[in-house]
Image: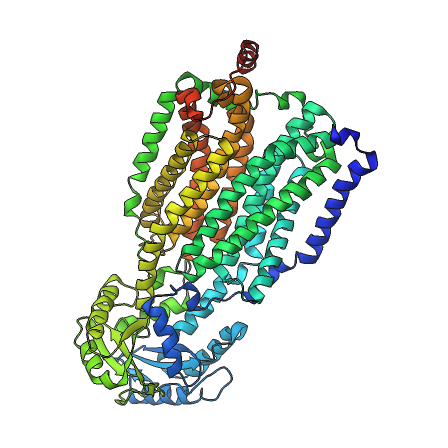
């Protein structure tokens, strides 16, 4: 009535003003989606636990570096073993020519010949701030060191890995966003068979992403939040997927109201009023679930929390302001050439969902028991998913030059070469610490750090009364055997009285990250479940239904992990996942998965207030079935777009979320939840009681249900 009584010019001025404001936001802030990489960092400290021993060593070792550097390890492999004197001399001269060149931080170490005589290695310290120039400098190093006749040259080490990582993230601004938007647009065109509505929804999502990236850019530029390539990619996918999901729910409700009311402005206000609660509650579960990552001790996990929450808030803002304004201006034209019909506003819905509702109505107990058994069987495989970390040769999905070089290095030198365990200790106990390290089973050798990198030097460089020792492990630095050796090494050096020894390095970082991730799961998982439970209780004004919903999404998550364990090992060839993958999968899948149950159950409660629980469930399922399924498919497709970034971590996250969302949408939300609520009946809303429908309403509901 308020809409109808307002002056005509006011009724049209508000949506027009909102559209113009968002056009200004999109035009001004849109470019920030491509500029976020300017404030992103991919250094190793972004992935380490704050309080871990390896992180403290990483900070302490900076005092021993006369100039900050990132090592590149040049590896020569001879075509005819062993290395000749001429080849050794040529390698020495090649390395000497690198000293003083742009991008070279210090004099390279002399070339060392392997015990089998078939390979040589030399360490070239590169400047740490090369940025986009790093690949060029590495190419110059490769070209200069390739002048050793009868050998092939490769580059391993942190500098080479950093270059490959930057190359993998190179498509994150354009390719990833383009693939995600194209997938969403194609699905919307196929589902809605209209021209304007998919474009309006895509524009709304792009505006939300532009606003989110601009906010994150400013915060990152002022060091308020931290962004790396991983967080940047997930932000884009999260905003596009969430904004599209919320837009689909609002657009579907607007279509119903428009068919029933006729007046576009009244329809859009009614659609916003009746869907805003579910949208805000759904966004709240995701945003608060992401903010729970602030309890993590891993830097990149904590970074994703506020960044992701900002993205969700922007997605909701665009959905509840720009999209209603655009729909109000377009009216029925938004659905052209498929105009809304009066039948679209009834509880009949799509005939497929009528059949599914009828199936559940006939045998609800059989449906929920059979679907639960299926999920339990799949969940039984979840313990097989190893999250002990990904080996170096599995970090990149495609062949990476740094991985191949590291494999060559491991074949001819101790497997831990290039990634030693770094020991920092008091200088007065240097001899005792070195002796303890050398006596540790699994340690191939211990070398004092002299500041110049001279092999065989015995006098360690002393800084503030502390020394550094580099311990080369016999096993590959990323192996379980190396982590066992690290544990023994720490026990030995920690036992040296007065040494205050600490052990870091690559293996220690992997070990500490794994331990911290396990600790994070025990804290964050209950927090996320509690947040979701409280939001559901507030929205549905019930205790039993929210508990059942949380239990079903948790079971869906375990079932997804079970399928992932089988697929990763037996199809994709992954020996395990990064330590943070299960936690990321849980936060995204549970928080996003509960969205669809919120959409469903908020409508079920609305219908139950008018028609009773049985008819409320059937009507809620048939009216929301199509839009929620479309939303699930869209979200799965957007997360699947992460596979264009050739990193195992993102590929694994993409599959877990995409498959889990589809499983939740097609099985949990479509069959398990409706069947459970239908079987329990009105008691499902305990302790609240719904207003009992009148006999007339019952007869009308029965007639509508059976057509």
Residue 486: quadrant of the picture = bottom left
Residue 396 placement (x, y as % from top left) = 41, 60
Front residue of 633 and 423: 423
Residue 576 placement (x, y as % from top left) = 32, 54
The relative height of residue 62 versus residue 369 in the rendered view (above or below) is below
Residue 36 visible in the shown view:
no
Residue 621 placement (x, y as % from top left) = 51, 26
The relative height of residue 191 versus residue 690 in the rendered view (above or below) is below
Residue 697 visible in the shown view:
yes
Q: Quadrant of the N terminus?
A: top right
Front residue of 614 and 621: 614
Front residue of 2 and 113: 2
The colouring scheme, among rainbow, by chain, secondary structure or one colour, is rainbow
Residue pictured at 30% horizontal, 67% vertical: 508
Q: Quadrant of the C terminus?
A: top right
The relative height of residue 48 versus residue 677 in the rendered view (above or below) is below
Residue 449: quadrant of the picture = bottom left
The relative height of residue 402 versus residue 27 in the rendered view (above or below) is below
How many marks can you see?
0
Residue 580 placement (x, y as % from top left) = 38, 55
User: Going by the image, does 129 lie left or right of 317?
Assistant: left
Residue 542: quadrant of the picture = top left
Residue pictured at 60% horizontal, 36% vertical: 276
């Amino acid at each position: 009535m308020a809409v109808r009584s307002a002056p005509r010019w006011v009724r049209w001025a508000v949506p027009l003003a909102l559209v113009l404001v968002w056009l200004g936001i999109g035009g001004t802030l849109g470019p920030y989606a491509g500029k976020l990489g300017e404030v992103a960092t991919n250094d190793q400290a972004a992935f380490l636990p704050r309080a871990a021993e390896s992180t403290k060593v990483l900070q302490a070792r900076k005092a021993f570096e006369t100039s900050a550097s990132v090592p590149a390890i040049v590896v020569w492999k001879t075509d005819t073993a062993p290395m000749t004197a001429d080849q050794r001399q040529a390698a020495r001269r090649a390395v000497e020519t690198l000293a003083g060149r742009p991008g070279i931080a210090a004099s390279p170490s002399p070339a060392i010949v392997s015990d089998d005589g078939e390979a040589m290695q030399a360490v070239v310290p590169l400047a740490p701030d090369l940025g986009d120039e790093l690949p060029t400098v590495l190419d110059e190093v490769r070209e200069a060191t390739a002048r050793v006749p009868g050998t092939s040259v490769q580059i391993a080490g942190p500098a080479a890995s950093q270059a490959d990582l930057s190359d993998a993230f190179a498509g994150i601004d354009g390719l990833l966003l383009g693939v995600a938007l194209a997938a969403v647009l194609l699905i919307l065109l196929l589902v809605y068979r209209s021209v304007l509505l998919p474009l309006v929804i895509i524009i709304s999502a792009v505006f939300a992403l532009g606003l989110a990236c601009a906010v994150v850019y400013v915060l990152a530029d002022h060091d308020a939040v931290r962004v790396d390539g991983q967080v940047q990619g997930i932000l884009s996918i999260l905003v596009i997927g969430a904004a599209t999901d919320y837009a689909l729910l609002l657009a579907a409700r607007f279509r119903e109201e428009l068919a029933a009311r006729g007046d576009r402005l009244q329809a859009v206000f009614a659609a916003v009023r009746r869907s805003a609660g579910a949208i805000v509650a759904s966004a709240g579960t995701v945003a608060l679930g992401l903010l729970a990552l602030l309890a993590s001790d891993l830097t990149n996990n904590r970074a994703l929390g506020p960044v992701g929450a900002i993205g969700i808030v922007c997605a909701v803002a665009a959905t509840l302001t720009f999209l209603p304004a655009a729909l109000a201006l377009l009216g029925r034209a938004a659905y052209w050439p498929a105009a809304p019909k009066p039948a679209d506003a009834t509880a009949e819905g799509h005939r497929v969902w009528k059949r599914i509702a009828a199936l559940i109505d006939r045998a609800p107990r059989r449906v929920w028991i059979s679907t639960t058994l299926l999920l339990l069987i799949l969940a039984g495989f979840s313990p097989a998913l190893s999250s002990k970390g990904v080996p170096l040769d599995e970090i990149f999905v495609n062949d990476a030059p740094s991985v191949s070089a590291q494999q060559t290095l491991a074949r001819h030198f101790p497997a831990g070469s290039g990634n030693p365990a770094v020991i920092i200790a008091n200088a007065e106990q240097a001899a005792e610490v070195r002796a303890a390290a050398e006596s540790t089973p699994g340690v191939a050798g211990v070398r004092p750090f002299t500041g110049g990198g001279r092999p065989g030097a015995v006098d360690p460089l002393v800084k503030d009364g502390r020394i550094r020792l580099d311990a080369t492990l016999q096993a590959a630095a990323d192996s379980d055997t190396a982590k066992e050796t690290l544990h023994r090494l720490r026990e030995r050096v920690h036992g040296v009285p007065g040494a205050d020894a600490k052990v870091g390095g690559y293996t220690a970082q992997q070990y500490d990250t794994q331990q911290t991730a396990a600790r994070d799961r025990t804290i964050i998982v209950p927090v996320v479940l509690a947040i979701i439970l409280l939001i559901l209780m507030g929205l549905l004004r019930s205790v039993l239904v929210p508990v059942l919903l949380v239990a079903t999404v948790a079971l869906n998550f375990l079932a997804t992990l079970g399928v992932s364990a089988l697929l990763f090992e037996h199809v994709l060839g992954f020996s395990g996942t990064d330590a943070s993958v299960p936690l990321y999968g849980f936060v995204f899948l549970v928080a996003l998965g509960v969205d669809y149950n919120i959409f469903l159950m908020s409508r079920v409660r609305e219908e139950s207030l008018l028609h009773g629980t049985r008819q409320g469930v059937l009507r809620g399922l048939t009216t929301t079935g199509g839009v929620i399924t479309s939303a699930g498919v869209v979200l799965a497709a957007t997360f699947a777009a992460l596979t264009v970034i050739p990193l195992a971590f993102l590929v694994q996250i993409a599959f877990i979320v995409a498959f889990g969302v589809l499983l939740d949408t097609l099985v949990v939300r479509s069959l398990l939840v409706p069947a459970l609520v239908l079987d329990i009946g009105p008691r499902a809303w305990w302790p609240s009681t719904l207003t009992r429908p009148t006999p007339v309403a019952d007869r009308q509901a029965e007639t509508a249900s059976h057509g």
